[in-house]
Amino acid sequence: MSEKKTPPDINALMQAIPYARFLGITVDQRGNEITTVMHFKEELIGNPVLPALHGGTIGAFLETTAIAQLAFEFSEGDAAGSALPKPIGLTIDYLRSGKPVDTYGRAEITKQGRRVATVRAEAWQDDRSRPIAAAHGHFLLKPADDPAGS
């Protein structure tokens, strides 16, 4: 029988990442699922005429969502003290303008090897069935022979 691992504190991880702190990202962790939340603030606006969120903040939010999911799946208790997965490549599909409201994200690990994981992430605002952006990325996991993940 396998031991049940303690879920990591992903919010502590978000506080340890300076850009995630700037973006105001928090994590809602319920059972074995996490949802990231980028709380709206004026600094995130890229187009004040519409107004719309800056594409860079949406892309960074999706990357952070993917990293949070990987940390949630693979760290043992102390996510903030673990080596973070490193992005190898990330493609963002911008589907519609991000409104000046809170943005939510979820990620799914679609393939995982010993060193690389493939993750798909989505961001939405009012309606999860109408995402504002989606990402597909590859991340380098910490090598098994390198406990520090450097």
Image (tube, helix red, strand yellow):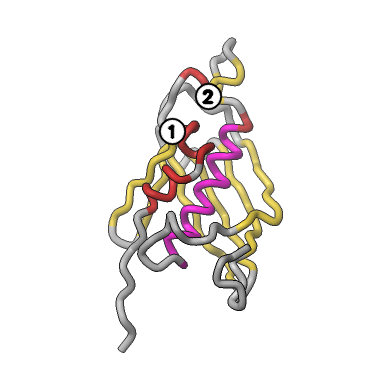
Among all residues in the image, which is located at the extreme bottom?
1
Q: Relative to 116, is 125 on the left or the right?
A: left
- Marks 1/2: CA distance? 10 Å
Amino acid carrying mark 2 in the image: Leu
At label 1, the amino acid type is: Gly
Q: Which mark is residue 44?
A: 2
Residue 6 higher or lower than 57, as above or below: below
Q: Is residue 32 above or below residue 102?
A: below
Q: Is residue 102 above or below residue 135?
A: above
Magenta stretch: helix, strand or loop mostly = helix
Upstream in sequence: badge 1 or badge 2: 1
Nearer-the-camera pick, 108 or 22 = 22
Give the class, few, some or many, for how many residues have Cα within 10 Å of label 2's Cα (few <14, many ≥20).
Answer: many
Location of mark 1 (residue): 24
Percent coordinates x, y for residue 74 in the rendering: 46, 67
Instruction: Characterize the local packing of mark 1: few (<14), some (14-19) or many (20 or more) Cα atoms within 10 angstroms.
Output: some
Is disc 2 placed on a helix, strand or loop?
A: helix
Residues at marks 1 and 2 touching, judged by CB atoms closer than 8 Å: yes
Q: Residue furthest top?
A: 49
Quarter holding the C terminus is: bottom right
Depth check: give the residue in front, 28 or 124.
Answer: 28
Residue drawn where x is 49% and y is 31% of the image: 22
Residue 71 part of the magenta-drawn span: yes
**Which residue is depicted at the point 57% across and 12% down?**
48
Does residue 94 show up magenta in the picture?
no
The span picked out in magenta is: 57-74
Residue at 60% x, 20% y: name it: 46
Left or right: where 102 falls relative to 55: left
